[in-house]
Image (spheres, helix red, strand yellow):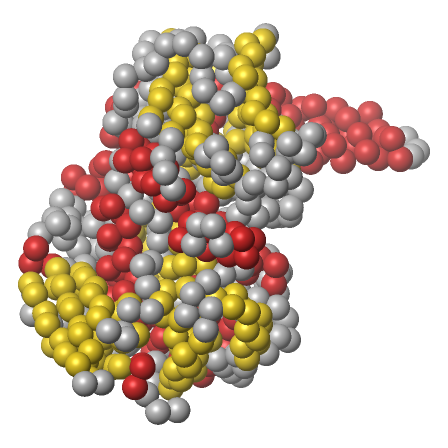
Amino acid sequence: MMKRYIFGTPILDTESVIHKPEPQQGDIPYFGCEKGETGVKFQYTMEKDKPVYGLGENVRGINKRGFRYVSFCGNSSMHTESLERMYCAHNFLIVDGETRFGVFVDSPGRVVFDIGFVNPDEFIITSELTDFEFYIIEGNSLREIVRSFREIIGQSYIPPRWAFGYQQCRWGYESSNEIREVVAKMKESGIPLDSVGLDLEYLDNYKDFTINPKDYADFADLSKELKEQGVRLVPIIDAGVKIEEGYNVYEEGVEKGYFFKDKDGNDFVGAVWPGRCHFPDFLRPEVREWFGNHYKYLTDMGIEGFWNDMNEPTLFFTERGLKEAMSVVDELRDSQLDIPRRRRLLQAVNGMANNLKDYQSIYHQIDGKMVSHDKVHNLYGYNMTRSAVEAVDKILPNHRILMTSRSSCVGMHRYAGTWQGDNYAWWSHILFNLKLMPSLNMCGFLYTGADLGGFHTDTSEDLLIRWLQLAVFTPLMRNHSAFNTRRQEPYLFQKKDIMRDVIRIRYMMIPYLYGEFVRCALESDMLFRPLAFDYEGDEVAAQIEDQMMVGDALMIAPVYTQNARGRYVYLPEDMMMVRLSSPEHREYVQMEKGHHYISAELHEMIFFLRTEKMIPLAEPGLNTDSMDFDRIELLCNVKEQGSCTVYVDDGFARDYENPAYYTTIQTVRKDGRLSVEQNGKKLSLVITDCQNQKL
Ligand code: MIG
């Protein structure tokens, strides 16, 4: 079922896979394989029209066929279809067809996946490194292949329950008083809120593990005060460490030799937000321990969540690039800037950032050897985040924390979630957000979501509302935007009541989402599944990329088109449509398998409950701390009988399998009425029988 092949002698164990089967000898099944000077090439002829799924965070659709994708963690601030790569390297795919198998390229270097791009039927994988591991995963269904893969890469990160609450963030909250104001206005408007993200402003001149002494001087008080109101602060941490005499992190790192080096063995210099920086060599365990322990500075002030940014790592410029660009500038200064010269100028300046030449000139110390960064590039963000989690888990042993990272590769899913980077206030990015969910889930990244409302460019009210309606279901539900855009806190809009009700719907759904999340993590399942994964053999379902199964009981079909007042939906089986404009205003319509046009005004959202399924709901509060998760409304679409499991822990516990957290509920229809039996932890239950609701 699972075959592992080792090519050459890998530089290191990526620790993407932690339960490794014995390696195989001999030829790889399915693929032709060619070893060359510039890497190893695998070739497979795909069956006509059959889909290929996977690649985690990358561009385009759920079915990846028809394009070329690259795994080399990048930082492009414009997510277009042509991009080829994003911030992550998630090298797992499933090739579907009569012959069906999964493939995972366990390489820390650059890998290219040409999936019917150059030649429509050819699937060609090129690994730039000749030393790496390669897996073939077989199974009877798409879901089984995913499960087998997930079992070898280990259990997905589970955040605390409060991380399922709504998060407000913005690059540009200038002071602690501005944070207080945001929290107060959310409360005044009755909009639930569990956390506020802190971007670069809280730092003293962009230095990690410092506090802006002027505008955030009362940081510790702020943190305490807000937590008493059920709101947690989530500060950002960047990968680059500012070069500055007297700055403890810089001085320790230099003294201990913990930063990655240039070819001469000097600490490598690259610029990010603070200007010139050094970068921790996160591939070394002692460096991870050292950097991770610095998070204590913030946990000591009550912080329980972080987001790790710029860890591809992003390099704005290096001395080399700067010199080169400046010399081009000098050379062209007085010239007639005709098109070729203008192009050279722009290339020299724009090419300063994230330049391959620079990545090739960085050296890591691995088992006493110097290894150039480009060969292990994809492991950097992963190990930065691992550094944080390993340390914080020791500092706060009884606490799950919120941790997300922008860059990652497979393996980091055990430590943290991801946010999907710098998107735009574009309708197409709502759909892209949806499409990323199942691909990321395949690779173990369950806790993920996009910047709601769009990071770049001005959002609009209707776009934010529709995006929030999708995000009711994404585990990470965070509104975030860049400093130079229109503010997008929900209370600023005319239709803030709609936004409030959408967010309240999310809070109502938390028992279902959180319970299903924990189940999917423990059972190596996907929370978000394309219809093809549940309705194999249904040719229509196989084509659909804008509807999704969420957990065991639901299908979602978000509206993501400007001015739309509804949408077409395909039902792969009979389902109950739930149309709601608030937790209290719901409508249930029994619908048959097939195609339907379903109206959904801006203030309405829809989801579908499968037949013989039930979902647990809670009464929404202003934050998760203040909610009673032992009081459950069970929304039942049961004709004869159904069963479900409700998971209720304290929101922090790590003993997920403890029976004390589980209630199994059986419902049976007798004489038209539902009878209910609970086993396990006793919950106070209210039954909503949507089969018997009068419209
Ligand atoms: O170069 O910290 O993706 O969420 O607001 C931009 C500023 C750096 C990128 C992150 C974004 C964050 C921003 N950061």
Tell me what residue is drawn at x 31 percent, y 47 percent: 525
Can you say which quadrant of the picture contains the N terminus? top left
Q: Position of residue 642 (x, y in %)?
A: 22, 68
Q: Nearer the viewer, residue 457 or 262?
A: 457
Q: Is residue 518 left or right of residue 541?
A: left
Tell me what residue is drawn at x 49 percent, y 12 percent: 130
Tell me what residue is drawn at x 33 percent, y 26 percent: 2
- Evaluate whether residue 246 shows in this view: no
Farthest-out residue, bottom: 694
Can you say which quadrant of the picture contains the C terminus? bottom left
- Evaluate whether residue 526 shows in this view: yes
Q: Position of residue 113 (x, y in %)?
A: 57, 30
Tell me what residue is drawn at x 50 percent, y 77 percent: 492
Q: Is residue 58 left or right of residue 233?
A: right
In this picture, is 494 found above or below 269?
Answer: below
Res 440 quadrant in image: top left
Q: Nearer the viewer, residue 583 or 498?
A: 583
Res 627 quadrant in image: bottom left
* Numbered disc total: 0
Q: Nearer the viewer, residue 160 or 174?
A: 160
Q: Position of residue 328 (x, y in %)?
A: 77, 26
Q: Nearer the viewer, residue 544 or 337?
A: 544
In this picture, is 608 found above or below 316?
Answer: below
